[in-house]
Image (cartoon, coloured by chain):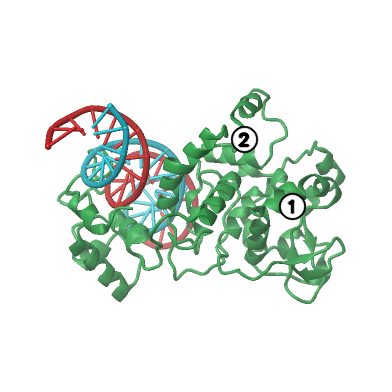
Chain colours: A green, B red, C cyan
DNA sequence: AATGGGGGCAACCGCGGCGTC
DNA sequence: GGACGCCGCGGTTGCCCCCAT
């Protein structure tokens, strides 16, 4: 990675080849940041805090547009930004998350402390994408290239997590409710960590299930809110309502950010993919609600959940970075235990 | 030593969602 | 309900560095 000084030495120009300024005001500086500008921005934000990017440049004495200031702070100046090469475990995590989430870099970055969405995006485009291709894997779908071609010709039947990620990543429509605070590194650190995202309608479960699993388990009974407002569902997931004796109620009452963080942790666990997929797909409902006294929910069937459109729920789980404790698991009867 | 090309990455842009008026 | 402003995201661009020739 280039040092700030070297970036500054690059002189005017920098990224973005378009001539249209991002800010309507003329006379604003563009291109690489100088150390002096960095110092101005850093000291101001340390003194006054983040936010109000539109007016921040003027208040800080910078001839930059607010977007440029925000980007510089988020991607470079923030103390929490980690420097140095992507570690092998981070690379592995990026691969797994991308397999689940597609090109939602901010969400992926939210799971990797100290890394920014821009950094991960660049790393993906310059390293991992090529690496996968060299291994004969489609970087978009994470499927073998030849298999992917077959899949593309088969009307996308039986979508799985990969195809879901592909669809989402290729969709122009953002999936994120930006107004909801997120502890993502690119978000305001003062925000609460309970931000929840809406589920894109494209990811909603099929109201007329046709798969074997869907027929065997009445998922629609558990997801009533999806039909009239997915945001309601997700907001309730963040409500931390975990009455253990109400296990048969709307599943949404039991879903918390921490729960989905555990959910995602299990999703990015290779064992979850290799060992539990087939058996759980046909034997268990997608969620198992704990009956213990603690606020516990175990999602023991992440793959099934993915297939039913719960992939989007992963997004909310990415907001619980601080949930580093071992996820509590429950068995089919709701008995919780610590893994 | 000169130079051409590719890799890496910081920075920009357009777009869409949300909040406010 | 519509207009407007702000914010954040993903995609893209272009400069610098490094290496091969």
- Helix, strand or loop under label 2: loop
The reply, left or right, for residue A118 in relation to residue A91 is left
Above or below — where is C17 with respect to C7? Answer: above
For residue A143, the mark is 2
Residue at mark 1? A223
Position in image of residue A248 (x %, y %): 83, 62
Above or below — where is A34 with respect to A227? Answer: below
Q: Nearer the viewer, residue A84 or A150?
A: A84
For residue A313, the mark is none
The reply, left or right, for residue A312 in relation to residue A187 is right
In the picture as drawn, the residue positioned furthest to the top comes out as A153
Where's the C terminus of chain A, which quadrant? Answer: bottom right
Q: Nearer the viewer, residue A81 or A194?
A: A81
- Helix, strand or loop under label 1: loop
Residue at 54% across / 56% down in the picture? A89
Subunit ID for the residue under disc 1: A
Q: Residues within 10 Å of mark 1 (few under 14, many from 20)?
A: some
Position in image of residue A295 (x %, y %): 72, 72
Q: Tell me if I can see residue A145 in this picture.
A: yes
Residue at 31% across / 61% down in the picture? A53
The reply, left or right, for residue A127 in relation to residue A312 is left
Mark-to-mark CA distance, 1 and 2 = 30 Å
N-terminal of the two: label 1 or label 2?
Answer: 2
């Amino acid at each position: 990675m280039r040092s700030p000084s070297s970036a500054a030495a690059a002189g005017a120009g920098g990224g973005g080849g378009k001539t249209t300024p991002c800010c309507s005001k003329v006379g604003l500086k563009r291109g690489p940041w100088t150390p002096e500008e960095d110092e101005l921005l850093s000291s101001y934000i340390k003194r006054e805090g983040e936010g109000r990017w539109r007016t921040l440049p003027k208040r800080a004495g910078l001839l930059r547009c607010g977007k440029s200031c925000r980007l510089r702070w988020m991607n470079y100046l923030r103390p929490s930004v980690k420097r140095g090469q992507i570690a092998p475990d981070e690379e592995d995590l990026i691969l797994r998350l991308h397999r689940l989430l597609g090109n939602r870099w901010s969400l992926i970055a939210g799971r990797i402390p100290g890394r920014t969405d821009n950094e991960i995006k660049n790393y993906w485009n310059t390293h991992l994408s090529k690496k996968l291709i060299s291994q004969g894997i489609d970087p978009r779908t994470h499927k073998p290239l030849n298999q992917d071609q077959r899949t593309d010709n088969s009307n996308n039947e039986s979508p799985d997590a990969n195809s879901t990620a592909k669809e989402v990543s290729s969709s122009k429509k953002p999936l994120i409710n930006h107004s909801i605070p997120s502890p993502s590194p690119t978000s305001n650190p003062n925000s609460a960590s309970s931000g929840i995202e809406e589920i894109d309608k494209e990811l909603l479960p099929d109201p007329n299930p046709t798969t074997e699993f869907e027929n065997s388990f009445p998922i629609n009974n558990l997801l009533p809110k999806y039909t009239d407002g997915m945001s309601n569902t997700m907001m309730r997931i963040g409500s931390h309502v975990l009455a253990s004796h109400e296990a048969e109620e709307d599943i949404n009452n039991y879903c918390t950010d921490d729960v989905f963080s555990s959910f995602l942790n299990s999703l990015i666990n290779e064992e979850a993919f290799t060992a539990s997929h087939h058996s759980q797909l046909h034997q268990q409902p997608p969620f198992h609600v704990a009956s213990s006294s603690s606020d516990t929910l175990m999602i023991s069937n992440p793959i099934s959940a993915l297939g039913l459109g719960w992939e989007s729920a992963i997004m909310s789980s990415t907001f619980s970075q601080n949930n580093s404790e071992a996820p509590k698991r429950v068995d089919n009867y709701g008995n919780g235990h610590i893994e």
